[in-house]
Image (tube, helix red, strand yellow):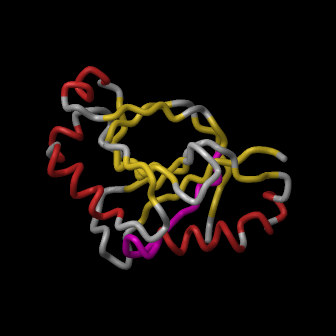
Amino acid sequence: MEYKIEKRKAFKIAGIIHKGCKLDTNFTEFWDQLYQTISFDKLKLLGNATAYGCCYSEDNDQTFSYVPSYHLTNEKLAKKYGLDVLEIPETEYAIIALKGKVPYCILEGWEFVEKELFNNEDMKNYQISNSPYLEVYSKGDMYSNFYEMELWVSIEKK
């Protein structure tokens, strides 16, 4: 899989936080809930219309929080809609290019992270950080074999 290392400035997202998730959680239901709460047309008005699946852990157990969300520049509008607002801190990411049907391409991306990413010469001085990880969705048919998106894995120097 192709990847690059990039530092990204802090930004905000708005969505619905789901705590206590496990790897076998049905994340599609969370996206459905978001779209049932707020229409896609209204979500696009929050910022630049980029959709993010945000994962983060608040403790060291086997669960994490997942946030189906959209890029945010209009915090007042997000609060009006009753959405949760999160600030994604400035951090360095390993940005992995994914291609294929969702969720399969995401699962393949995580398999690459777990088994191969840190074995690459340019990644030997890095480790996963505690900042959120992001699934960055693009426009297009998410169920196409040719769909392209990115997985942003937060990293830090050892």
Left or right of 86 on screen, residue 119: right
Up-down: is 63 above or below 81? below
Indicate the position of residue 107 as horizontal and vertical percent values.
Answer: 50, 72
Furthest residue in direction bottom, as rendered:
145
Q: At x 17% / y 43%, what residue is drawn? A: 38
Viewer-proximal residue, 130 or 42?
A: 130
Indicate the position of residue 50 as horizontal and vertical percent values.
Answer: 35, 45
Up-down: is 109 above or below 49? below
Up-down: is 74 above or below 2? above
Give the residues in magenta. 93-105
Viewer-proximal residue, 95 or 39?
A: 39
Q: At x 26% / y 20%, what residue is drawn? A: 76
Indicate the position of residue 125 as horizontal and vertical percent values.
Answer: 85, 52
Indicate the position of residue 145 as horizontal and vertical percent values.
Answer: 37, 79
Q: At x 37% / y 69%, what residue is drawn? A: 147
Q: Is residue 96 magenta?
A: yes
Viewer-proximal residue, 122 or 13?
A: 13
Quarter of the view holding residue 1: bottom right
Left or right of 152 on screen, residue 100: left
